[in-house]
Image (cartoon, grey):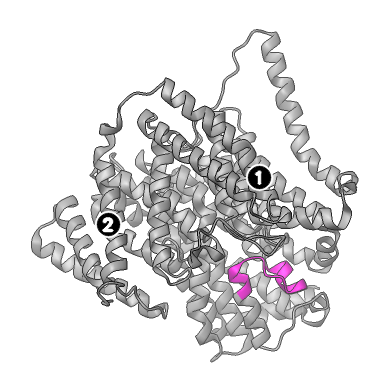
Amino acid sequence: MIDNALIALDALFDPMRLAALFAGMLVGMVFGMLPGLGGVAAVSILLPFIYYLDDYSGLAMLLGAVSVVYTSDTITSVLLGAPGSPASAPTAIEGHALAKQGQAARALGVGFLASMVGGLVGSLVLFFAIPIAGPIVLMLSTPELFMLALVGLFFASSMIGKDLAKGLAAAALGVLLGVVGPAQAAADFRFTFGQVYLLDGFSLTIVALGLFGVAEVISMLAQGGGISHQRMEVSQWGDGFRDFWRHRWLVLRASLIGVLGGFVPAVGASASTWVAYGHAIRSTKDKSKFGKGEIRGIAASEGANNATVISDLVPTLLFSVPGGPAAAIFLGALFSFGYYPGPRMVTQNPDLMFLIVWSVALTSIVGAALCFAITPMLARLTRIPFAIIAAPLVLVMVIGAYQATSTIGDIFMLFMLGALGWLMKHGGWPRAPALVGFVLSGPMEQYFWLTNQIHGWSWLTRPGVLVIASIIVIPLLISGVRKLRQWQSNEAVTEPEDTDTAEECNRSVALMLAALAATLFLYALWETFTFNPASRLMPLLAIAPGVPLTLWLVFRGVREFKPDLARDAGELTILAVLLAYAVALWAIGLTIPTLALLCWMLLARAQMRLWTAALYGAVVFAAIWFLFDVLRGDPPVGALIPLS
């Protein structure tokens, strides 16, 4: 094994292969910083170029891109509050809150270090696990896979916050969004309303960008000024080193969670990141800071998502089952170079396996170092008026959403989910459980149906299921015993505060959202009776708690109603402008509405001088067209006036 590892290392240090690796790394860093694009876009861009290289160089280029995406997307998540990828949503929650407090450099420092350690841990585990990874994965059948997904949902419940009803309702709403489209267990299409666009369901990228990115842009535009209202000290990034060292064991545990999540097909970085984030919450005595700028949340989530990058390739290489979309593209590249993944690949192509290990380890270190080098400059961006940053940010999110299916429905859905995210933020509903429910709804439904078809209900007594179930049961018992002791000693039980927003709940928005959610759940209940029995299971698992919870929230909202909608009138205006922009894109194409949006943001919101706004707007507009060209996609064309 050592001989093969040294041969692979020597092969990687060929100048051409190192150049290919670092070229891919730079592309991955750039696309990681663009919200909604991430690893899939990066490897898609590089795919045509790898065929001009030898097999090791081409594969190294792809590995360089995917290895640093979760490192560089920390920048966008922290500074702008828009997740660079769905897996970095926890970083956006905690890191952006710290950025608003003038501690962006501290959050970035911890994020970069945790990402580097996550990549190294993933590489180290895979280095020693290559001979035994196949048997381990084969030991996990559908009952164990279902229980692992259930554990992910259990840890996500840690993010429910102070208001249990709102947290559970948000999770149920996320599951309901996740079951839109084709059923996993039957030939059914659910909740499509006769729209072709909904036949494939919602894109994870669009859901993450809408709930978090668009909602944050609206709030920051309404507040005015920079992201941080405090003076940013460049030297503050050193605090990140101290925070990282203080929480080093949490980073290691989160990295191992990420490795395990990558081993399991269909779980991947998004789910394992939330599991690690939930672990950070449960392992902390004082949970009140989560959602308001808790550095432990960044350390856990960044360690997990980078560790998942390399372990995602285990099912890809051993069973031709891609761990994620980027891994699927990597699988196609393997086929094109004459490699055929399977259990024998460990013995037939050991050099290639170790090439993957060395590539990910090297780019994890170099990528983090490059991010650290530009951290002081990036931290200063938090003092720039946000409206100047928001102009290109909104347009990049539009491109990131549009690449999902290249239809106008992507853009409509982005801003509609952005409106939902805004309602949840101001209505006191935590958005994190909604995203977790959306991510886990698919694998949970698939595994549960297969489990019952193959094993009946006897799967509940399987040793693996009982061991995994203990991960849920033991913390519940410990928590119950702790609360019982506090009750017996007449001590007040301290509940964690809301984990999604520090703003006071807008009661008008809370009532509006509760009524909207109740209507959706009741309609979904009626619609469910038209489905095949096998395809009703997952919708009913969301509807059963969703209906009573939302009706209770409506009743409570009416009882506590206070007409305070006017206080957020400025944000409602911005939301209306963005929705109008989506309609204009559908009607007359990209050019005219985009120029109008740029004029409004730069002149009305940022209050730039005319000639400065014209020059900056021209650069942004040209960059948007360049991105469409690089992504080999056509911009939206108007339905009423066929302009692009």
Say left or right for 525 vs 224.
right
Q: Which mark is residue 172?
A: none
In this figure, which residue is indicated by the disc labeled 1? 540
Q: Secondary structure at mark 1?
A: helix
Whether 613 is among the magenta residues is no
Percent x, y of residue 22 = 50, 75
Whether 316 is among the magenta residues is yes
Quadrant occupied by the N terminus: bottom right
- In this view, the residue in front, 344 or 206, is 206
Percent x, y of residue 141 = 83, 58
- In the rendered structure, which amino acid carries the disc numbered 1? Leu
- In this view, the residue in front, 215 or 116, is 215
Q: Is residue 407 above or below residue 501?
A: below
- In the rendered structure, which amino acid carries the disc numbered 2? Ala
Q: Are marks 2 and 1 in contact (CB under 8 Å)?
A: no
Q: Secondary structure at mark 2?
A: helix
**Majority secondary structure of the magenta segment?**
helix
In this figure, which residue is indicated by the disc labeled 2? 580
Q: Point out the frontmost of discs 2 and 1.
A: 1
Answer with mark 2 or mark 1, whichever residue precedes in sequence: 1
Percent x, y of residue 547 = 57, 36
Where are the magenta residues, as a range? 313-328
- Residue most extreme to the left: 610
Whole-number angstrom distance, CA of label 2 to CA of label 1: 35 Å
Q: Is residue 195 above or below residue 455?
A: below
Asked if residue 240 shows in the view, the reply is yes
Percent x, y of residue 424 = 44, 40
- In this view, the residue in front, 274 or 449, is 449
x 9%, y 65%: residue? 611
